[in-house]
Each structure stands twice: as structure tokens, then as C-alpha cells.
Image (cartoon, rainbow, N blue to C red):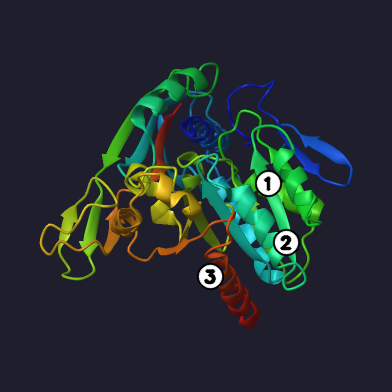
Amino acid sequence: MHELSIVMSIIDIAKQQADRACATIIDEIELDIGTLSGIEMDSFEFAWKQAVRGSVLEGAVRKINTIEAKARCLDCDAVFSIHHYFDPCPVCGEHLLDILSGKELKVKSLVVS
Amino acid sequence: MCATCGCDSGGSTAIHHLGEHEHTHGAHSHSHSHSHDHGHSHASSKTIVDVEQDVLHQNNLLAQRNRGYFDAKNILALNLVSSPGSGKTSLLERTLKDLKGELEFAVIEGDQQTTNDADRIHATGTKVTQINTGKGCHLDSHMVLHALQGMKPKDNSVLFIENVGNLVCPAMFDLGEKERVVIISVTEGDDKPLKYPDMFHSSTLCIVNKIDLLPYVPFDMEKVKANAKKVNPALEILEVSCTSGEGLQTWYNWLKSRVAVSELI
């Protein structure tokens, strides 16, 4: 249940950024979460509901950009979508992959007032 | 950002330096300096702030700080991860006893509660600090930073950081280690690498423990190796038994080869 730690870190970042912008209200928060980031979305949702209560993010609209995982095969150079680390290259069947995207876990932007 | 269960009472992290005084870290603050270059805006207007900040940024910063400390003191820091009961502490006990006098060791133990594991390590005569994470399911770089401040491991030593028994959460948290070692035992399923791919993907060495029990359990060694290599083709795999001692020499050789490499740098 590390998702709670993750949500707490997001609240810290949002608060820091809102303070820096001299804002009192956060209207929106935009997050990038890759499908290989290690976040279980059901747990994240559960943790979010509990953790934002009474925080700067309580009334904020949350937008999540789900970043699809992509990899390049180091044997045949094919680029393709993956769901798991153990997915083979669909062209040559090898497992030696360079992960190009999908590990993102970041606060992209805020709308404050 | 102390261990993060969201609960105020039980969530504080306790650090026990065995053989020394003890102290507890609650939610304490670190000072940070920020530049304030904001312009003036009306209270009613909405502003878009481009943040682009990694959620694990703070953990990663402190991990890099730990890494710098290890590099400066030429300490080989290894993060040992596994599910509970795979034999991490037993492997450490054997290693510390068998290599006593050859290498200098220090150990950080991570568990939710008790100093049981640290007591076992302390009995081998090795410097040990226990971190109790309370409700926390993993160690983070912040806890390790404080454990290091109290224990001060010697220059040129090997530091084992035994993480909380959990194959999921610790995968996301860099502690500043040089390498991550994942341990599984033959009493677990041979599909573990596929079920918990993040951990196997982020480790460089996999130790399969309890191989003395192979005749009694339906564990296919070749299958687990194939599964692990699917997740991480670069993963090295060693087979050991802490009970019979089989395979331990290969693990010791691996350890010594890493010490030799870190001494060259």
C-alpha cells in the first residue's frame, strides 16, 4: 500500500508549489502516471480519497494522463507497446528491451487561484 | 515524509542503534530554501503552474545524498529485498559469521515492529541499526539517512540494508544502494518473478534460497530462472542453502568481486 506514500508526496508537492505561487486554492492538478510506474490505480484511488481530506487538494479536480508503456527491442530495434516487463518483442520474441515510456510518475501542472 | 501510513499515532519511525542509546524520529521537518520569484496576481485570477516534478523527487534526492556518502567512504551498500520468510536474515547471519575477519560489515534492519532481526545480527558481533517503520510497508531513503547518522559505518565496509519483507512496495524506493539483491526461496512459487515483476526488474542479483528443500517441494528451478530472465535478461541468479551451506561460496565470491570493484574506483 505504498500508494498512500505516493499521494502524501503529491500533496506535499502541490502545497509547496501553491505556496510558491502565493495561491490559496488549487483548482486542478494534472498527473502523469505510466502503466509501469508501479501504481495500482484502485489503491491509489482509495488512498487519494482518504489523504486529500483537509489538505490543499481537497477541492481540486484531478486529471490523470495515463502514459502507455513502450519499449524498443535491443535485438531487432522494433518499437512496440507493452503491458508487462516480461512481454516479448512481437517481431523476434526476445526479452531484451529498452523501456522507452511508462515509468512516469509526476505532477505535471496545477491550476491555482 | 516519514513512513507515510497517513496515521499520526502509529506511523512514526523508530530507529534503534543496538548497543547504544535509542531515539525516535517523529514527523520532523527539514529546511529547504526556495527562490521566491513570483509576480503579483489578483486573488480571483487563475494561474497555471507548470510543475513537471517527479512524485518521488524528494526520496530520490535523499537517495543520491546517501549514494554520495557511500561513494565517499567507499561503502558497498546492498538493498536486500524479498517476501517475508525467504531467509534474508538467515543469509545475513551465515554471511557475517563466515566472512568475519575478511570483510568489514554493517547492517540496517527494516521491519514494521520489533528488534528481533537486529538482535540476531547483533549476536554475530556486527554493527546493526534497526528501523521500525510502524505502519510503513517499505524503507525510504529518509529513514536510511537517519539510520546512517547514528551508526556511522566504517570506510571500505559492506552495508547490508535488509528491507521490510514485501515484494511490492520497496521496489519504488531508491535508498541510495549500489545494487539491489532480491531473494526468493524454493518454498515460494516459481512464478514469483512474473507476479512481482517490478522487484525483479530493478534488481541485479537474485538469490534462490533453501535449495536443500528442493526434493520436498514442486519448485522448478529452470522455470524460475526463465521467468526471472523474461522480466530482466541481465539478472544474475545464484542458488544457495543457508542450512546446508551449498552455493554460499558463490555468493561470497560475488560479494568479494563487488568489494574489489568498489575499491578500484
**The disc numbered 1 marks a residue on which chain?**
B
Marking on residue B109: 1
Q: Is residue B244 above or below residue B59?
A: below
Residue at mark 2 to residue at mark 3: CA–CA distance? 16 Å
When the figure is inspected, residue B175 is found, relative to residue B51, above or below; the finding is below
- The residue that disc 3 covers is B250
Labelled disc at residue B263 = none
Closest to the camera, between mark 3 and mark 1, is 3
Lower sequence index among marks 2 and 3: 2
- Mark 1: amino acid: Glu
* Most distant residue in the left direction: A91
**Residue B82: in sight, yes or no?**
yes
Q: Pick whichever of labels 3 and 1 is earlier in the sequence.
A: 1
Amino acid under label 3? Thr
- CA gap, disc 1 to disc 2? 17 Å
- The residue positioned 58% from the left and 27% from the top of the image is B5
Whether residue B69 appears in this view of the structure is: no
Direction from residue B128 to residue A64 in the image, left or right:
left
Q: Are marks 1 and 2 on the same chain?
A: yes
Q: Secondary structure at mark 3?
A: helix
User: Circle 2 is placed at which residue position?
Assistant: B97
In the foreground, A10 or B118: B118
Up-down: is A92 above or below A50?
below
**Protein chain holding label 2:** B
Label 1 environment density (alpha carbons within 10 Å; few <14, some 14–19, many ≥20): many
Disc 3 to disc 1, how far (Cα)? 24 Å
Q: Residues within 10 Å of mark 3 (few under 14, many from 20)?
A: few
How many C-alpha atoms fall within 10 Å of the one at disc 2: few (<14), some, or many (≥20)?
A: few
Vertical side of A7 occupied by B93: above or below: below
